[in-house]
Image: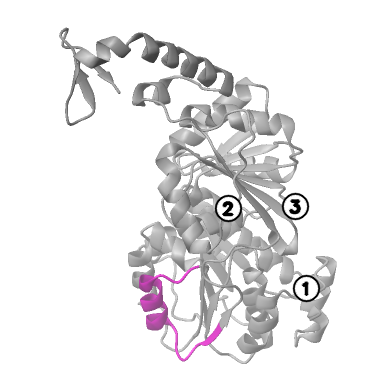
Amino acid sequence: MLFTDLNLSIPIQKALKEAEYSYATPIQEQSIPLLLEGKDLLGCAQTGTGKTAAFALPILEALSQTQTFSGKRKIRSLILAPTRELAIQISDSFKTYSKYLKLKTTVIFGGVSQNPQTEVLGRGIDILVATPGRLLDLIQQRFISLKDVEHFVLDEADMMLDMGMLHDVRKIITHLPSERQSLFFSATMPKEIEVLANSILSKPSKVTITPVASTVDTIEQSVYKVNKVNKIHLLTNLLETLEMDRVLVFSRTKHGADKIVKALVKMNYKAQAIHGNKSQTARQLALKNFKDRETKILVATDIAARGIDVEELSHVILFDLPEVPETYVHRIGRTGRAGLGGIAISFCDVAEVNLLRDIEKLISKRIPEVKDHKYPLEILDTVDAQTKPVDQKQNQQKQKHKSGVNQSSQSFSKKSQVNKTGYKKSPSKNKKAV
């Protein structure tokens, strides 16, 4: 469906045309008519499907139709997002779509001084995009009143659950008027999220674009099994051998992200990290450099990455497999956005094999394994696996050496005793694994 076929005013249509929006995505096509009728909505859709425009456009349409120009502006629409990056992205979208409307949007989030934010709030705004912590803080300081909110949006609700934000969200809801239009979006629907949705929404319409645990069909997925110590070597090998335009690398921890960047920079790759320990200025600069192609590689943690929306992102690499299977869907969803193709590569060490099985069970498909690569997974003793890089040639030499040792020790083995734990007891009291 074309955006021109939707019941949107001329100023909004003009802004959409300038932004080169022509065809509505499925969630936009299904959600916008319902929201224009004033209905509550429960939307379940993967990231990258166009949720922001799906709720922003009907909200802007409603606000523009009932706008008054007397007195100080009051907050009439509230959008909650889990991360600073996502909040900024949503705010920018509202400003793009409302270019020819006399509506004011601002965004607030923690990690920076509140003074510039409170100054803007003091002058009056129509639309507020916020992260829960900073919003609740400013409510308690009486800088913000939500008593005039007509439209409330909770975006990426499942991520708020992962980040422990639901308590703050419930507190914020107590400050909202009971008469309002509520919109609830989540990529997955665990039980806690369903309970929250039921407490917020009133007879909602439901829009589900893809199955809860599905992965985008346009994304080419693969997995490389590799020893943990060799992951960085495999990463650099792929960067050298595959054509990669821009690469988003996922690390499980902030410390891990910094280590990956340090190793890449040492090998003259342009890489930056984005995670919760970085200042807001540093995070925004890293994201800007990545979008502007000044930086080829961005290494991120899950919390920081949910708000990353980069067009034509060629590759996503999961340096560490996620402990929560649903997170895999979010991670690879950073590529293949808006119907474009993309490639998602996962690294799996011996300790992550069960995590891989959980992911494949969730998405109901096997992820193709690439076996012919320079650093195949080798099952070593614990010390070797943690401290020594292993490639195929080294392993062959080790196996050859072990074979020679086994042949020369056969006569000794007959004299040794084997205990229940699999160790041989020798007269010298030294233990060697069988």
Q: Read off the residue under disc 2.
A: 367
Q: SS of the residue at dot 2?
A: loop
Within 10 angstroms of label 1, few (less than 14), some, or many (20 or more) residues?
Answer: some
Among numbered discs 2 and 1, the one appearing first in the sequence: 1
Please say which color scheme the image uses. Answer: one colour
Relative image position of residue 196 (x, y in whole percent): 38, 76
Question: Magenta segment: does it hold 195?
Answer: yes
Say which quarter of the image contains residue 406.
Answer: top left
**Residue at label 3?**
312
Look at 50% across and 29% down and name the residue there. Answer: 259
Q: Identify the mark at residue 100; answer none if there is no mark.
A: 1
Q: Which mark is in front, 2 or 1? A: 2
Relative to residue 49, is residue 414 depicted above or below? above
**Element type where label 1 sits in the image:** loop
Tag 3, which secondary structure? loop
Q: Amino acid at mark 1?
A: Tyr
Q: Is residue 109 above or below residue 346?
A: below
Image position, residue 337 (x, y; %)? 69, 60
Decide which of tag 3 and tag 2 comes sooner along the chain: 3
- Give me the C-alpha separation between circle 3 and circle 2: 23 Å
Q: Which residues are magenta?
A: 188-206
Residue 175 makes an appearance in the image? no
Closer to the N terminus: mark 3 or mark 1?
1
Of 182 and 353, nearer the camera is 353
Q: Nearer the viewer, mark 3 or mark 1?
A: 3
